[in-house]
Amino acid sequence: MNIVWMSLLALAFQQTSAQKWKTNNFTICASPLPPMAECQPGSDPEGFTGHDIEQVRYVTRLMGWTSANYSIVCLAAFDDIINDLTATDGGMCDIAAAGITRSMERERMGIQFTYPTYRASLGVMVRANVREGSHWGFLRPLHWSVWIATPLTALTVALMVFVIESIACHGFVHRADWVQGLKNATWDSFISLVNFGHFEVHSTAARFVVMGYGFLVLIIINTYVANLAAFLTITQVDTSATQIEDLYGEGVATVAVYEEQLKSQGITPVIVEQDGRAQEALLESLRTKRYKAVLMDEPWVTHTVSSGLNCDLQALSDTLVHFDYAFGLPRRAPQDFVDQLSKILLQMQEDLVSEELVERFIRFPSSGCPKDNEISDTRAVKFHQVLGLWVILAGCIAFAFIILVGNLFRHIPGAINARALEGRSFRQGLSMGRMNPIPTRYTPKASAQLRKSSCQCKDLRLQLSEVYEAVSSLAAEVQRMGGPVVPICASVAVEPNSQRSVPTGSPLAPFDGSSSPACSPTMDTSNAASVADVAHVRNENGHSVG
C-alpha cells in the first residue's frame, strides 16, 4: 500500500515539474557548427540560422510557445554546451540544439537526448591541389599494365601470324624468311594499333588470329579515346588521400566523441579540444600538412569544402562511423518533456518537414571550386578490366592452330607417298601436297622460290612446245615431198622424276617408252630417211629447213 502511494506522489511531482518546466522561460543553447548552427556569440538571435536552430524554432511553434517563452543563446565553444548540460548544480541551457551527437558516454554524463534530428556520419576532409597540365597527360587514360600488355600482344600476334601463314601457305617456314617475314608482320601489327594499316593474310587460320587481334585493338582504341576526352577536358585535382585505406597509420585529427569508434576501425586519431578555435585550428593544421586528414561531422565537412574560400580542401566520397544528431537536455529535465519533444520531432519527420530542412541547409549546391569528379589514376582503365579481350584473342589463336593442325594431318599421306615414290624429303612432300601454295607478304623467300619454280615450269613448257612445232613442221614438209611416212609418238618425254607433265596426247605429254598413244605423221626411218637427209633434199630444192 505504501508503494502505491509513493508511486502516485512521484507521478504527481513529475507532472508538477513538467508543468513548471513548460511555463518557464527556456534557454536554448547553440554553438557555431555550420550548417547545423550558424551563430555568433553576443549577436542578435534573430540572425541565428542553421538546420538545428530552424528545427527547434519549428518545435516551439508546435508546442504553442511564443518568443516570450524562450530565448536562443550562442556559446563560443561546443565544449561549453556539454559542460553546461552536465553541470551538477544546474546550468543555463535547458535545450541544446547544435548538432550534438548521441552517445552512451554522454548519456552516462547525465545528458538526455530526444528522437534523432538528423542521421549523420563522419566525413573525411583532405588537402587538394589542382593538377597542372602534363606533357605526358595523354598516357593517363590507360593504366601502365595496359600500356605494357598492348605492345607485347602486338609482338606475339606478329609471331603467330608469321608462323601460321608460312605453314598454312607453304607447308613449312623458310629459314631465310625469319628476319624479313617477322619484320613485315611486326610492322603490320603495330600500325594496326594506331589504325594506320592492317595485316595481309591469305590462310583461314591466320585470318582467325587477325580477327581476334583486330577486335582487341578496336576496343582498346575506343576506350582510350573516350577516357582521354575526360582527362583532357575536366579539371584534375590531386588529394592527400583518395580512400579510407590511405588513412591507416597516418596522422588524422578528430574530436573526443569519435575516438573509440575510429580506433575500432584501425585508425588512431589525434584528439582536438572543441574550444572556440577548434574548427579554424583543424583547417590550419590540415593546410600545413600537420595532419593528412580531418575526420569530423559530415555536414560540417561538406559545408566547409563547398565554400568558395576553401577550394584547397576536398571531402572524400567515403564516410565513416554513422551516428545520430539529437537535441540535448540536462538531467533535471522531466522525462515526459523529453518524450513530448521526441513525438514532435517524429511527427516532423513523417510530415517531411525534416526533409525540407535537410534540403535547405545540408544538401545545398556546391561552389565553383574544381572537383576531382572521381577521375584520377585510380580511374584509369586497368588490365583486369579488359582482360576478356585477351581471352578472346587466345581463343582465336587456339582455333587457328586447330585449323592448321587439321590441314597438316590431311596432307600427311601425300607427303609420305612423295617421299617413298620420288625420294623427296618429308618436308618437301608436305609442301608439295599443300593446296595451291600462295605467295605472301610474310614469306618473301618461300614466295620467291615458288615464283622461280613456276617460271622454270613455264620455260620448260615453252621449249617443249617449240620442239614439237619444229618436228611437226618437218614431218609435214617430208610428207608433202612424197616421202614414206610412219607414225611416231608426237609426245615429248620428260624426265621420269619430274612432277611437271601435261595430259597424254598433247604436245607436252610425257612419254613412258611403252606405247605411243598419240602420234603424228613423219618419215619412215626404215628406208634410211633421216632428218638430216630430209634437210639435204630440201636444200637441193632450194628450201630452207631452218
Image: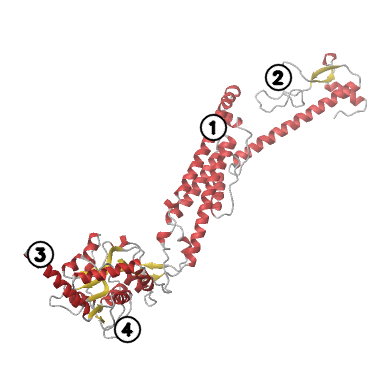
Name which of mark 1 and mark 4 comes first in the sequence: 4
Query: In the image, which disc is placed on residue 161?
Result: none
Does label 2 or label 4 sit earlier along the sequence? 4
Residue of label 3:
4
The three-letter amino acid code for the residue at tag 4 is Glu
Mark 1, mark 3: which one is toward the viewer? 3
| CA–CA distance in space, label 3 to label 4 | 48 Å
Mark 1 → mark 4, Cα distance in angstroms: 90 Å
Lateral position of residue 284 relative to residue 222, left or right: left
Question: x%, y% of residue 546?
Answer: 85, 30
Reading the image, the residue beneath label 2 is 512
Q: Which residue is mark 1?
A: 406
Secondary structure of the residue carrying numbered label 3: helix
Q: Position of residue 159 (x, y in %)?
A: 51, 44
Mark closer to the chain start, 1 or 2: 1
Q: Amino acid at mark 3?
A: Val
Residue reaching furthest front?
1
The Cα atoms of the two marked residues, 1 and 3, are separated by: 100 Å
Residue 80 falls in which quadrant of the image? bottom left
Mark 1 to mark 2: distance in Å?
A: 37 Å
Q: Disc 1 residue type?
A: Gly
> Could you give the CA–CA distance between mark 2 and mark 4, rounded to whole angstroms?
124 Å
